[in-house]
Image (tube, helix red, strand yellow):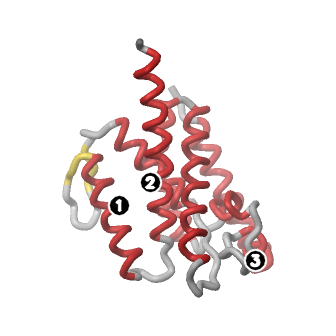
Amino acid sequence: MRAPLTLILLLLNLAAFALEMRSGDAFVTQYALWPYGRGFAPLQLLSSGFLHANLLHLGSNMLGLWMFGREVERALGSTRFALLYFASLLSAALTQLLVVSGMAETTPTVGASGAVFGVLMAFAMLFPRRIIVLLFPPIPMPAWLFVLLYAAFELYAGVHGTFSGVAHFAHLGGLLGAWLLMRGWRRRVVRSWY
């Protein structure tokens, strides 16, 4: 079974990045996620997830989507995978918006990271014992532990302001959105057995 939506999402992100590079700052200004009261528009909750700060940002997100998205899409099917991806993207954007709108933040947020973190959460819930090997350092660990440690790191980094310019709370929002959605689906499946 193939994963057509994963490929479509990759192509959409690449096309959006090409358009972003061609159009310049005006395009980013309109479609990036701005804090509430500082240029926010509802469309930005989704459009910001297809913009990226640079090639490295795009590459790391698309690598994560390709590595984990294909298997998650195969397990859930394309329709549920689409729901998962966009629910994670939306929950990431809403979390980021909630956090930065209460601060003196004046820069917009861009990137598919929140959605990719949601896909990662779904992967860990579907394949908890699957071994993931970190690149630096090369430590193998089960998927559930990898996601738990990654979430703890994101929370720590977000609270302490580590790696400024990284939307740590958007990452956490993507994880949370996927976790809630996956739990809801599991609960329905369990109930349908009775």
Disc 3 element: loop
Judge whether 122 appears above or below 10 on screen.
above
Q: Specify the quadrant that holds the C terminus.
A: top left
Q: CA distance from mark 3 to mark 2?
A: 26 Å
Amino acid type shown at disc 2:
Leu
Q: Is residue 81 left or right of residue 132?
A: right
Residue at image location 20% in from the left, 52% down from the top = 140
Q: Between residues 134 and 28, which one lies in front from this camera angle?
A: 28
Distance from the alpha carbon under mark 2 to that under mark 1: 8 Å
Q: Earlier in the sequence, mark 1 or mark 3?
A: 3
Determine which residue is flagged by label 3. 39
Query: Residue placed farthest to the top in the image?
Result: 194
Q: Position of residue 102 (x, y in %)?
A: 58, 79
The amino acid marked with disc number 3 is Gly
User: Mark 2 or 1 closer to N-term?
Assistant: 1
Q: Is residue 23 left or right of residue 50?
A: right
- Evaluate if marks 1 and 3 touch, with contact meaning CB atoms under 8 Å apart: no
Q: Which residue is mark 2?
A: 175
SS label for mark 2: helix
Q: Quadrant of residue 152?
A: bottom left
